[in-house]
Amino acid sequence: MTDHPASSWALSRIPGLGCVCPCRSTRAKGGSYLGAVPFLIAVTALLVLASGVVLLATYNARSPVASLQILSHAVPQGWLVRAYHASGTTLLAGLVYLGLFHGLLTRAYRAPGEYAWMLGVKLLAVLLAASWFGYVLSGGAGGYWSYQRAMMAALQFHGAARGLALWVLSGGLPKLLVLHLLLALSAGLALWAWLAARAKVRATPPPGEAVPFYPYYAAQYLVALCALGFVGALLIGFLPHLGMPALNAVPGSGLSFAANPGLPWYLAPLGAAAGSFHGAWGGIGAVIALAVTLYAVPWLDLAPPEAPPSRLHQALTWLLGAVVVALGVDGTMPGCPLAPVLDPLLTLYVFLHFLVLLPLVTWGRAK
Amino acid sequence: MMRPFILPLLALLAGAAPAAAQTVPSFASSGPLGHIDAAAAQRGFAVYEASCAACHSLSALHYRDLEGLGLTSAQVAGIASGIKLADGTAATPDSPFKPATLPASAFGGALPPDLSSIAAQRPGGAAYIYAVLTGYTPAPAGITLMPSHYYNSAYPGGQIAMPPPLHDGAVTYADGTPSTTAQEAADVAEFLTWASDPTLTARHEIGLRALIFFGFLFVLALVLKRQAWSNQS
């Protein structure tokens, strides 16, 4: 295999690049386009981080709506930077969800990929936390009342949990801005660690089945990159507020009360699952239980690592995907009369899938 | 068989205005390739100044932003100089739009909303604004109106505290367009859509160009990929 001189130059000089860059790897023939999802996540994350840095130049946490309006109205192409950041977040969350779903479908979490899987779950968790802070920082009524609800929940805690929650949430938007930046940087680190862990455990294909990354998979990644650009252009140009509650266009204030502020689509499944349980502790317990369950998936799947996923396993994974989408749709419709019944059932099914159905389906193959 | 189910669903997905019984005109700004009709929005600004500005603010806009509607710097400076601010001085192009002059007490404590992003806030956008502005009718039999409220078929709940703001001939359009109530409502709806999203036209233009660019690049990359893999199949 021959390296491109530019990639050889970069790989031999830039620390940490070799463990995430796929250019020196060999791959099995016939890989799917979904294999490019981690690369697309990295590209989108860079775009979101870069646009976030530009946003920082004009954003004022003490008057968020006014500063964003100045950016949109008075700064040349400022609206485009804001659209990159908002639509980039939508793309990024969608790609991370897609990457994890693909991992569940193909059993990418099986040994030796357990650690890479756990880092992927961590990436999703940090990304969602960062995006919630970003939603609140937009200054809209949706974010404002979501923040107020979190404050009210924190007041229900006792002892150290109450102190910690209030420390995080009190201090207003300036402190949330700092936490948003810290979480965004943490998401960047989690992404790098995830890519490195995936590269480390990537199976080496048998000699007759292997092809070098360049030019074969480089060409495939280019197609995926163009598709990403197409979807990005569609979102920025025509659907800039996709999945955002319309309420967030109203400037947030204590005078415009919203009992059900709603959440952006990428937070909606988690919000609906948390809302299925009684009280603040119930909601937080549900979120923690979901994260722990996702972490434990490699050990809940009892089939041998080398076994391909069975049809029943794949069918159940598709059903799980549909259930999560239904939770998300329900979560983006605040005040939906079916929500009190539907959300607990759907959340229960998610736990049922991982804790009962997955071990049961894979147990037969373990014997 | 499916028609009775699908049509309301499509209307819901399109964000149709609730309970809007009257015919709503098609707006240039609506639809995926829509653009701001600068002439209509300029007329809408005149309607806003004449009929809305006393009660509703437009805090996100400066007078210089009107250049985005195709007005020249001199025209904007002329408009601004004709507006007297609270301190008695004349506005300049860099002044924010003059805040509403009437206090909250004039409205029974319920301050009329700022209109900067009203089109983005309400499902249906311009169509909703038009429907509310033209939706004043006598209350149907059996409906008792609350004090100082008016019946409006397009407003959620049917009762609105705002008196009918428009009437025929409320403004005189410079371009000679007849100023009927429906025309004024359509023009001010287009103006408020622009105020809510001043970059709508540019966004759609850039989006379309980017879609064509990436679509072409996608096909090119696909051909390149197939060529690269051809010796492996």
Image (cartoon, rainbow, N blue to C red):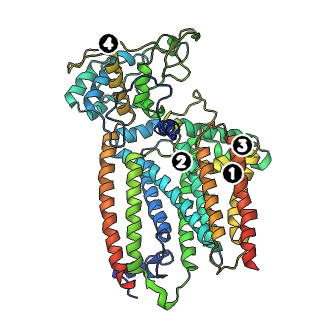
Q: Position of residue A186 (x, y in %)?
A: 57, 60
Q: Are marks 2 and 3 on the same chain?
A: yes
**Local crowd size for mark 3, using a 10 Å CA cut-off: few (<14), some (14–19), many (≥20):** few
For the C terminus of chain A, which image quadrant? Answer: bottom right
Looking at the image, the residue that sits furthest to the right is: A159
What residue does disc 1 label? A346
Q: Amino acid at mark 2?
A: Gly
Q: Secondary structure at mark 1?
A: helix
Q: Amino acid at mark 4?
A: Ala
- As drawn, is B96 to the left or to the right of A267? left
**Local crowd size for mark 2, using a 10 Å CA cut-off: few (<14), some (14–19), many (≥20):** many
Q: Residue at x 57, y 10 (%)?
A: B145
Q: Secondary structure at mark 2?
A: helix
- In this view, A309 is above or below B131: below
Total marks shown come to 4
- As drawn, is A176 to the left or to the right of A52? right
What residue does disc 4 label? B170
The chain holding disc 2 is: A
Whether residues under marks 2 and 3 lie with C-beta atoms below 8 angstroms apart, the answer is no
Q: CA distance from mark 2 to mark 1?
A: 27 Å
Question: Who is closer to the viewer here, B131 or A44?
Answer: B131
The chain holding disc 4 is: B
- Judge whether residue A165 can be spotted in this image: no
Q: Nearer the viewer, mark 2 or mark 1?
A: 1
What residue does disc 3 label? A341
Q: CA distance from mark 4 to mark 1?
A: 55 Å
Q: Secondary structure at mark 3?
A: helix
The chain holding disc 3 is: A
